[in-house]
Image: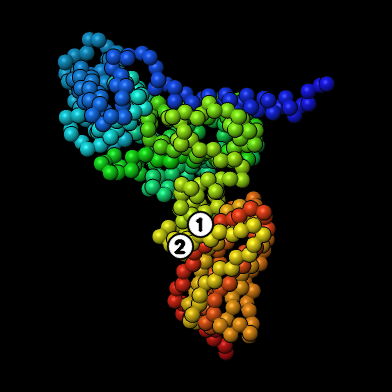
Amino acid sequence: MKERPETRATGGYIQEADQMKNEMSVRVGEANGEENKEETLPDHEDEKQAKVALTLLKRRIEDAIQGNHLLGKPKDSKVCQNEALKAIGELKEIKLWGVPLNPIKSHAGTDIVLLKFLKSKNYDIRNAFEQLKKTLIWRREFKVDEILEERLDPEFENVSYLNIIDKEGHPLFSDVYGGSKDEHSKKFDPEKHYGKFLRWRLKYMEKCMKELSFEPGGVDSMTQVIDWEDIHGLHTKEFRSVYRKWWTLLDENYPEIVRRTIILNIPLWFHVSLSFSSRLITHKMNGKTIFARQGKATETLLKFVSPENLPVEHGGLKRTDDDEFSPEDKATEVNLKAHATEEIKIPAPKAGVTIAWDVTVVGWEVRYKEEFVPEDEGSYRVALQEKEKKGEENHNVRNVFYIQEAGKILISIHNCSNKCKKVLYRYKTRPTAPVYSSQK
């Protein structure tokens, strides 16, 4: 019997998934090398030993500054004394992410930055020092410190966005790799567009770095969200190339900055491969990378981001340039049972006010109805809107209504599915002067 074509295709997809998972696992294994054992502190979880490693790393940095080789040895071995002194003077003032690296400066953030390099290398002092040197050299050659001033083409303007925080106060950086097939090919053609994409991505990364605080008690790491929705040909060479290069660059030059990575809308074949593979389930990786299959993106994000800070595109309540609500306007959560109806009552005890409300249902698949009910329920009702919301719809429902007499806003939501749903809503009331029309 001949093998069915779809079976061969699925096998190929799983091989692609395994390859991508291996690429993502590189950072787990790179800190476990056997080289330079004499400088490795095995019990790195012990605070005292971590301090010892930090002290040794500081000594190396001081020696490298005084010896003028923190950014590599000078190309010209016959550098005059004045030039050498000038170079050493510049190294004494060198900074990374706005934090002085010279231990003599006694800056509060120096230890925090250096500990990130130590932790990423399993507290191997020599490897941490080499990674720090390479990062500084890369930033100088790539002109990363100048990238925020660059005017880049708006070609990738919708690829990344910021201005979101998770529940623990960490900045959230989102990458959207999806789009139409033509857009996907345009974004991820490594020969034509990778350089532009990389600089745009780095520009947003540096913007996010400005949101961090390398001070004791400050927020010094971020959450990264990668959205694979509508990606066509995820197994293509173009996507793997961009993905692998960026992930490697991030690990090498921003160690321990990304505390958690959430990958949304992974295809079914990738989810199946994950279910049958334990390659990513390691002590270091577990909990740092979260995968959400298609249809579970909003549910997954709400575990880490409050609905007030989650953009409407991802099923939350946050809108750009919102004049009606702010993140301080907290949402109420209601559980909606399968095939059940829930009524949300918004009180309107007096006339002369305007009521605004936001409602979202995780996964939707509901019948939705809004109406105004006066205190004298036997008189009349005002139908505001009624619709059927499908599961693929993410945007929330927002409405406003001017109250002319006391009553209530009644929102009815019927769950059409056989699964429980989470309903999130908020409302606010503001005084409104009535508008009179003049007639001649």
Q: Position of residue 168 (x, y in %)?
A: 38, 47
Residue lying at 44% horizontally and 76% vertically, measured from the top left: 431
Q: Is residue 182 visible?
A: no
Front residue of this view, candidates 364 and 201: 364
Tag 1 near tag 2, CB within 8 Å: yes
Describe residue 170's horizontal placement relative to residue 315 as left or right. left
Q: Residue furthest top?
A: 78
Q: Position of residue 368 (x, y in %)?
A: 64, 64
Q: Residue furthest bottom?
A: 440
Residue lying at 37% horizontally and 30% vertically, measured from the top left: 255
Residue count near mark 1 (Cα–Cα under 10 Å), binned few <14, some 14–19, many ≥20? many
Q: Amino acid at mark 1?
A: Leu
Task: Report the disc number at residue 317.
Answer: 1
Of callouts 1 and 2, which one flags the residue occurring earlier in the amino acid sequence?
Answer: 1
Quickly name the residue at label 2. 325
Quadrant for the N terminus, please. Answer: top right
Give the colouring mode of the picture: rainbow
Gap in Å between the C-alphas at discs 1 and 2?
9 Å
The image quadrant that residue 93 belongs to is top left
Q: Position of residue 279 (x, y in %)?
A: 53, 26
Q: How many marks?
A: 2
Q: Amino acid at mark 2?
A: Phe
Front residue of this view, candidates 266 and 188: 266
Front residue of this view, candidates 166 and 210: 166
Quadrant for the C terminus, please. Answer: bottom right
Q: Is residue 382 visible?
A: yes
